[in-house]
């Protein structure tokens, strides 16, 4: 048994006379037992503890000493403890011959008498016996401690059983509530998914109908445009043509709104000054808001140009102004401002890093709560009374902003007002062209006669386009399919330009363009379509002409394509 095994336990020795203490301590040390030597009986008593392995004394020390302190310590030992004592006696000093030793044995309880002189082996054997007995006591102490700890845990468990049952019941209730909430969320998600699928189908249907309607309007507007050129300036025929043209243009505007809802309109994007656009709309905004609303404009003139579709942006701003007016039935203040903002990569996840013009329309009206604000751009959602709103306005503006690579942001507070921010990408590389310059550019191609191949499966549209081109002085060849156009190119016919519709059966305009470029790499091509979101063609980048178009727009696009050359 080594000292390391004993840990904090030790042996107490009190043999004040002679060399008994040194001999005993030396023998114990040889077998790895630590010993504490007490100089007097008081120190011996103070050295006793529940961690003591055994105590070694001499009988002559105990005969003439006050043993009450030791007796009290022995009597007050824990139930598991019975400290072994080894008492060294003179020969014949055992309890069988010595009544004093018998009384000592009764007081010390667990005592072993060892007569001197003793043999070392005998002493070590007695010491080991005492140690073994004490170890069993320590084991009993550990078991008792474990039992007490278990009883304490059991007592605490019994005391807290009701609380734990209540806590577990609360946990089950919370879990049940979570499950119910998840079920409700799933049902809501399924409802939203069904609504999204329904809206997708409605969008596809709307886009298809609007595209076909655009084709019909193309024939009407094209022919009316040609008729107006030859009608008398002051005559009933001119007035009738102008009225029909206005109705057709309103129909074209309606299709643009439908395509904006479906996010499929073809945008005529060009670099424009937003300041000039807002100044041009000032009178219209004033008439739309009425006298009870105070207008404030903060439109700096020195701002970069923006790549926008002029008509669509004007409609979007007018829509925001009307919404702001309706939110202030008792009057208020409507503020319109433009700000130059630079967006970094870490600033906004939805916007591409770059420079933007932020067009803000802010009112002091009723405002919206968070739930209403989250639904504001949903199609057909409206806070207006029945019959006073379609719920498509903000949805169309949101779709327009995304097509222009920008964003629509709304912020609102009940009782304070609403602010709509339309973010539009700035274009530093273009200079603004006045309408007169554009008109001059549109009429230029009429003086240069070229040979044009027109490809369109719709006979009415093809006829209208051919008439407008021939009226401009060009030589035109008309075919009604992509295969027919390729056959002409394979036969060696030379054309200065090919104008093709996109949506054609068996071969789209983009596919025709790729095949035509394989035969004629230098052939300029113009794609006429009512859609904006066409499948990407990585091999070719086609300039586009939005349907329905008039003769001036057709001439302008031809001039751009010829100036640009083949891509």
Image (tube, rainbow, N blue to C red):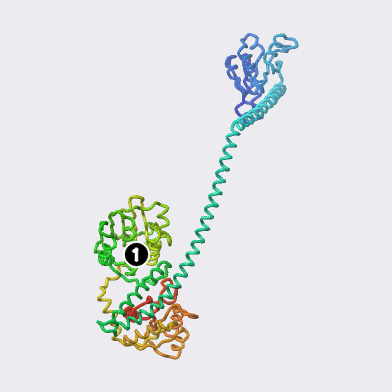
The foreground one among 383 and 243 is 243
Which picture quadrant has residue 82? top right
Residue 424 image offset from top left, x and y in percent: 34, 64
**Lateral position of residue 11 relative to residue 384, left or right:** right
Q: Residue 564: in sight, yes or no?
A: no
Query: Vertically, is 95 above or below 470?
Result: above
Q: Quadrant of the N terminus?
A: top right
- SS at mark 1 in the image: helix
Query: Furthest-front residue in view?
Result: 236
Residue 183 image offset from top left, x and y in percent: 55, 52
Residue beneath disc 1: 316
Which picture quadrant has residue 360? bottom left
Residue 148 image offset from top left, x and y in percent: 64, 28
Query: Vertically, is 201 above or below 83?
Result: below
Query: Vertically, is 534 above or below 19?
Result: below
Q: Quadrant of the C terminus?
A: bottom left
């Amino acid at each position: 048994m080594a000292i390391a095994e004993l840990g904090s336990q030790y042996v107490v020795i009190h043999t004040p006379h002679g060399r008994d203490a040194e001999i005993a301590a030396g023998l114990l040390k040889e077998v790895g037992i630590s010993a504490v030597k007490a100089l007097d009986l008081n120190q011996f008593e103070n050295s006793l503890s529940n961690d003591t392995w055994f105590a070694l004394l001499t009988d002559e020390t105990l005969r003439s000493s006050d043993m009450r302190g030791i007796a009290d310590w022995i009597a007050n030992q824990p139930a598991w403890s019975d400290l072994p004592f080894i008492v060294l006696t003179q020969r014949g000093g055992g309890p069988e011959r010595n009544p004093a030793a018998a009384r000592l044995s009764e007081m010390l309880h667990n005592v072993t008498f060892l007569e001197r002189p003793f043999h070392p082996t005998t002493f070590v054997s007695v010491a080991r016996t005492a140690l073994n007995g004490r170890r069993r006591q320590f084991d009993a102490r550990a078991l008792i401690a474990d039992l007490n700890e278990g009883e304490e845990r059991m007592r605490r468990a019994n005391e807290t059983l009701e609380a734990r049952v209540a806590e577990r019941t609360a946990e089950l209730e919370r879990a049940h509530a979570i499950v119910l909430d998840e079920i409700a969320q799933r049902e809501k998600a399924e409802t939203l998914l069904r609504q999204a699928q329904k809206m997708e189908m409605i969008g596809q249907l709307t886009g298809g109908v609007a595209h076909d309607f655009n084709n019909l309007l193309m024939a009407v507007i094209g022919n009316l445009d040609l008729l107006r050129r030859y009608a008398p300036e002051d005559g009933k025929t001119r007035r009738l043509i102008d009225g029909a043209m206005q109705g057709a243009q309103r129909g074209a505007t309606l299709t643009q709104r439908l395509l904006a809802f479906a996010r499929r309109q073809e945008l005529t994007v060009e670099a424009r000054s937003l300041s000039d656009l807002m100044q041009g709309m000032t009178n219209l905004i004033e008439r739309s808001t009425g006298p009870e609303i105070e207008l404030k404009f903060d439109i700096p003139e020195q701002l970069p140009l923006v790549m926008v579709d002029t008509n669509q942006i004007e409609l979007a701003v007018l829509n925001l102004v009307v919404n702001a007016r309706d939110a202030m039935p008792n009057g208020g203040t409507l503020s319109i401002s433009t700000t130059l903002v630079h967006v970094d990569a870490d600033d906004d996840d939805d916007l591409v890093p770059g420079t933007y013009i932020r067009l803000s329309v802010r009112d002091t009206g009723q405002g919206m709560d968070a739930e209403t604000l989250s639904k504001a751009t949903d199609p057909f959602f409206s806070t207006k009374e029945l019959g006073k709103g379609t719920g498509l306005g903000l949805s169309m503006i949101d779709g327009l902003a995304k097509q222009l690579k920008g964003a629509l942001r709304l912020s609102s507070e009940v009782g304070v007002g609403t602010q709509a921010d339309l973010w539009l990408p700035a274009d530093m590389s273009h200079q603004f062209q006045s309408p007169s310059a554009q008109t001059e550019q549109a009429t230029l191609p009429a003086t240069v006669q070229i040979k044009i191949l027109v490809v369109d499966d719709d006979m009415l549209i093809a006829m209208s386009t051919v008439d407008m081109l021939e009226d401009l002085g060009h030589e035109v060849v008309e075919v009604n399919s992509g295969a027919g156009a390729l056959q002409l190119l394979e036969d060696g016919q030379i054309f200065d330009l090919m104008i093709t519709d996109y949506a054609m059966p068996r071969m789209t305009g983009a596919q025709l363009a790729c095949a035509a470029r394989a035969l004629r790499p230098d052939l300029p091509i113009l794609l006429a379509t009512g859609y904006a979101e066409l499948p990407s063609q990585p091999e070719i980048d086609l300039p586009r002409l939005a349907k329905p178009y008039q003769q001036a727009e057709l001439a302008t696009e031809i001039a751009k394509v010829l100036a640009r050359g083949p891509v």
